[in-house]
Amino acid sequence: MHIEILVEDSSGERLLACLLPKILGPQGEPHTWRSHTYKGIGRIPAGLRASADPAKRILLDQLPRILCGYGKTPGIDAVVVVVDSDRRDCVAFLQELKALAARCDPAPRTLFRLAIEEVEAWYLGDRAALEQAYPQAKLKLLDGYVQDSVCETWETLADAIYPGGRMAIKKAGWPLPGQIKHEWAERIGPFMDIETNTSPSFRKLRDGLRSLIAEIT
C-alpha cells in the first residue's frame, strides 16, 4: 500500500523518518510512503474553503483542498495527518478533523494522529533513547514529567537536556528553537523503541498505522 503523510513541521518529519521504517518496514518492502512538511499547523478554514495563500504551506488552512485532491488521485491508499494538539481539547479537535475529511467527495481513507501536547512527548516516552542520545540529561527533572500531560512539553525536554534549558533557547530566539528540535529528532529518533514507548499518543500513531495496513492489505 502507499500512504501520503502530512506533518506540520520539518522536525516532526525528521522524527517520522526514523520511526516509520520501524513501524511499516523498509520503504517499498512492501509499503511505500511520502512525507509532506508544512510550516505550521494553522486552523481549519470556516466553511472548509481555504482563503490562505497555498504557497505559505500552513497545514490545516490547506487541508480541505489537499484531502479533496487526494480523494481523486489514484494510487493513494491512505493519508495520515500528524499534528500537535497543543492546548486544544483533543476529543473536540479530532472530531473537527474527522468531520473535515468526511465532507470531502470522494474522501480519501484518512488517519489523524495527535501528539499531546507536542511531539516532544514521544521523546519523553522513551527514557532509554533519551539517555542514550543525551547521557548528561537531568534525570530528576525527567522524573517529574507526567507522560502526555499539557505542561509545556518541549520546554520540559529543553530543561532536561539543553545547556541553560528553555530560557537559553528563548533568549537566543529564532532560528535556535527550530534547530534544536531538528537536533532532537536526529539524535533521539534513531534510538527510539516503538514497542516500549510509554507515550499514549505515540502508541496510537503506531497502532493506527498497523491497523491501517491490516485493513487494506
Image (spheres, rainbow, N blue to C red):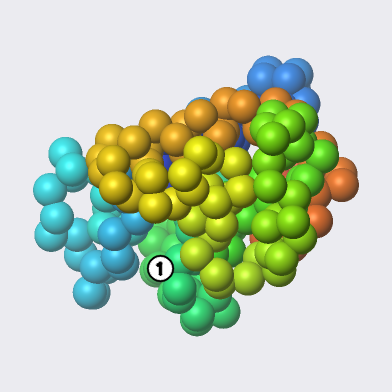
Residue for badge 1: 100
Residue 23 in picture, x, y percent from top left: 76, 36
Residue 109 in picture, x, y percent from top left: 57, 53
Of the pair 77 and 111, the residue shown nearer to us: 111
Q: What residue sits 35% from the left and 55% below the top?
A: 41
Of the pair 171 and 97, the residue shown nearer to us: 171
Most extreme residue toward the right, as rendered?
196
Q: What residue sits 71% from the left and 66% below the top?
A: 144
Q: Is residue 26 above or below residue 81?
A: above
Of the pair 126 and 58, the residue shown nearer to us: 126
Rendering quarter of residue 168: top left
Number of numbered discs on residues: 1
Q: Is residue 156 above or below residue 77?
A: below
Q: What residue sits 78% from the left and 46% below the top?
A: 127
For mark 1, give the secondary structure: helix
Residue 182 in picture, x, y percent from top left: 47, 32
Which quadrant is the C terminus positioned in?
top right
Residue 9 in picture, x, y percent from top left: 40, 42
- Left or right: residue 98 versus residue 173 is right
Residue 40 shows in this picture: yes
Q: What residue sits 28% from the left and 35% below the top?
A: 175
- Left or right: residue 113 versus residue 124 is left
Amino acid bearing label 1: Leu
Of the pair 100 and 12, the residue shown nearer to us: 12
